[in-house]
Image: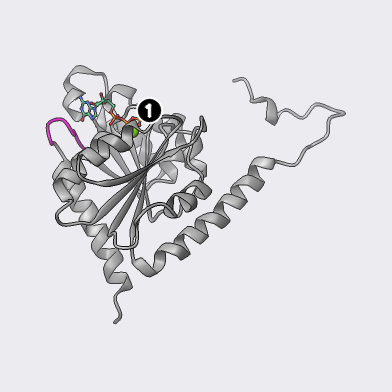
Amino acid sequence: MLQPKSNRAPAGTVQCENTTLNLLKANDFVARAIRDKLAPHNILVINICSSPGSGKTTLMQETGRRLKDTIKMGVLVGDPETERDAIRIREAGIDCLQIVTGGMCHIEAQMILQALDHFNYQNLDLLFIENVGNLVCPAAFDLGEDFRVTLLSSTEGDDKPKKYPRMFLTSELMVVSKADLLPYVPFSVEAVTKDARDINPTLEVITISSLNGQGIDEWCNWLQQKVNEKKNAAAPV
Ligand SMILES: Nc1nc2c(ncn2[C@@H]2O[C@H](COP(=O)(O)OP(=O)(O)OP(=O)(O)O)[C@@H](O)[C@H]2O)c(=O)[nH]1
Ligand SMILES: [Mg+2]
C-alpha cells in the first residue's frame, strides 16, 4: 500500500505544524457559537451528508411535502456553485437559503453562522443543513448539528463505509437511498449495514426510495421522534 506523502518522514526534513488541525479547532469554536445561538429556540439541527447525487435534495423535497404541515422546517443547502438546489427545495414549499461555497468541497461552521444572519430560523422546529456532496471533508467539520445523517445510494456500491470510515463513524443514521434500483445493481443492504456497524456499532440504518416512497414513513417517524425529544428536553420539569 502506498502511504500518503504526509506520513513519510525522510531524514533531514522538518516536521511542520498541521495547519488543518488549527483550522478544525477554529471550526469547533464556531460550531459551539452556533449551538449557543440556536439553543434558546430548541431547533433540531440535522447535517445531511453524502456523495454528489445520492439524493439529498430529492429527500429534502419529499420530506418537505410530507411534513411541512406538522413540522416547521428550513434548509441551508451548500454547493460549490449555483442556486439550483435551493430553488428545488423552495418549490416543495420549504424556506431555503443557498450557501455557495465558491468551489469548496464542504461547509464550514463559519458559513452556517453567516447564513443564519440572512435566514428566518427563530421559529423553526427543524433546520436541515444539506452539505456539499462529498464523503470525505464534511466528516471533519462540526456544523453545530444535533445529528449527522449520511445517505449512501444503491448505485454507489456497498463498499463505501470501509473506504470512507470517518463519515460513517461520525453519523448517527445511515440512509440507504434509491432502494427502487436495488433489483438492478450489485448492492447488498445487509453487507453495507454490517460494514458500517463494524465502524460505528450504534449507527441506525433506514432504507428509502424518494421515487417510490419505500421507507419514507420510517424516515419521517425518525425525524418526528427527534424533534419531539428536542422539545421535551427543553421543556421545564
Ligand atoms: N431512482 C432514484 N433516483 C433518485 C432517488 N432520489 C434521487 N434520485 C435522482 O438522483 C439524482 C440526484 O438527486 P439529488 O437529490 O439532486 O442528489 P443530491 O445528493 O442532492 O446531489 P448534490 O446536491 O449534487 O450532491 C436526480 O436525478 C434524482 O432524481 C431515488 O430514490 N431513486
Ligand atoms: Mg443536492
- Which residue is painted at 19% across and 23% down in the image? 181
Question: Image height check: is 194 above or below 127?
Answer: above
The residue that label 1 is drawn on is 52
For disc 1, does the CB lie below 8 Å from ligand 1? yes
Q: Decide if residue 199 is in sight here.
A: no
Numbered label tally = 1
- Which residue is painted at 61% across and 51% down in the image? 25
Camera-side residue of 202 and 57: 57
Residue 169 placed where, x, y %? 44, 44
Question: Image height check: is 72 above or below 137?
Answer: below
Secondary structure of the residue carrying tag 1 is loop
Location of residue 78 by image quarter? top left
Where, quadrant-wise, is the C terminus in this rendering? bottom left
Can residue 149 be found in the magenta stretch? Answer: no
- Which residue is painted at 62% across and 20% down in the image? 2
Location of residue 123 by image quarter? bottom left
Residue 118 placed where, x, y %? 41, 52
